[in-house]
Amino acid sequence: MGLDKASGIRIGKGTPGKRNLITDVPGVKVGQVTIRDGADVNTGVTAILPHEGNLFQDKVMAASAVINGFGKSMGLIQVEELGTIETPIIMTNTLSIGTAANALIKHMLEQNPDIGLKTGTVNPLVCECNDGRMNDIRGMHVQEAHVFQALANASDTFEEGAVGSGTGMCCLGLKGGIGSASRVVKLDGQDYTIGAIVMSNFGGAGRLLIEGRHMGEEIQQKLSSEQKDQGSIIMLLATDIPLNERQLKRICRRAGVGLARTGSYYGNGSGDIAIAFTTANRVPHYSKTAILEMKMMDDEHIDPVLDMSAEAVEEAIISSLYHAETTVGRAGRVQRGLREYLEEK
């Protein structure tokens, strides 16, 4: 997946992983549920599992960055304070975050009978974008069962484009959605992986950049779209490189570099959120020792990691557009997929 040779698009100079997906990071899984009912209902759920074990008991070190804060994501405050993630990450539409959080909490309670009794509560991590242009968002069509199913569907392969939580998303005047990519980085003679997954729903028509080429201007001549710069993007980064939460925060900020390269200037109405985690540093919920051993990078050697993080996000965004098919949504609105335009060239 990601962008293959058939797309005719090459982003950057880095080497993709085996699948060119975030799931190239060992242990990371993605599951999705797509919800469609006629033209008016186009929404869904995408679930990201940092590892296949019990995340509450075995947390991953993490960080987040709010690049532009017009968003309603849940759980970022504790990630910022403690530097860990203790649940799967759910992406859905803006008005379904409560439903998704309830389902995620129930999922964690089932796995952990000690939550709320012998230990504290749990921090559900739920991210959102507004799919109201293409979806009857007021209908709140996402149900808890959809979240449970997305979690159960988690696999190392998954679809991109207008699927899962990306079903109703629009981006840069085109159909947006779910996109992913990965990059391999060699450190001390060993290969490590950086993976990205995005839910793209940002940007005004005519602003799309692909490897510096102003594709948006060329496309807009055919689309005649006047969509304003509004919407959001969620950018998730995973790696198996040993990093601490400060270094993961630096990775999050480089997601903004990849975002800008595709044509965004972080508009007023955009919720641009980045979250990064490493599977290499784990934090046990119950520790037998007061001191935990962790590994981290020497910052003088971190530039290739920052470079490939930005590149993976950039490609994931373009991949979300490339794989998204032309969709007829709420009120008869039509959003064309990037591939349809490229095939006309």
Image (tube, helix red, strand yellow):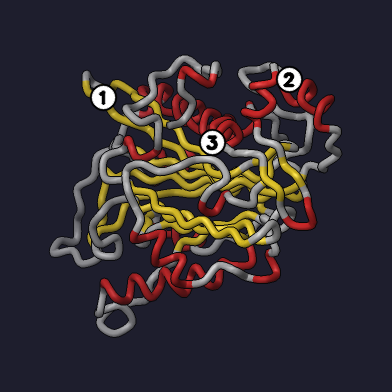
- x and y percentages locating residue 282 in the rendered image: 25, 51
- Amino acid type of the residue tagged 2 in the rendering: His
- x and y percentages locating residue 77 in the rendered image: 51, 61
Residue that mark 1 sits on: 191
Q: Residue furthest left?
A: 288
- Amino acid type of the residue tagged 1 in the rendering: Asp
Q: Is residue 29 visible?
A: yes
Report how far apart the C-alphas of labels 3 and 2 lie in the structure: 20 Å
Above or below, comparing residue 133 to residue 295 in the picture? below
Q: Quadrant of the N terminus?
A: top left
Above or below, comparing residue 277 to residue 20 in the picture? below
Q: Quadrant of the C terminus?
A: top right
Q: Earlier in the sequence, mark 1 or mark 2?
A: 1
Which label belongs to residue 255? 3
Left or right for 294, reference 122: left
Above or below, comparing residue 229 to residue 51 in the picture? above
Disc 2 crowd, CA 10 A, few/some/many (<14, 14-19, 20+): some
Which element type, helix, strand or loop, lies under badge 1?
A: strand
Question: Residue at 73% across / 20% down in the picture?
Answer: 214
Which label belongs to residue 60? none
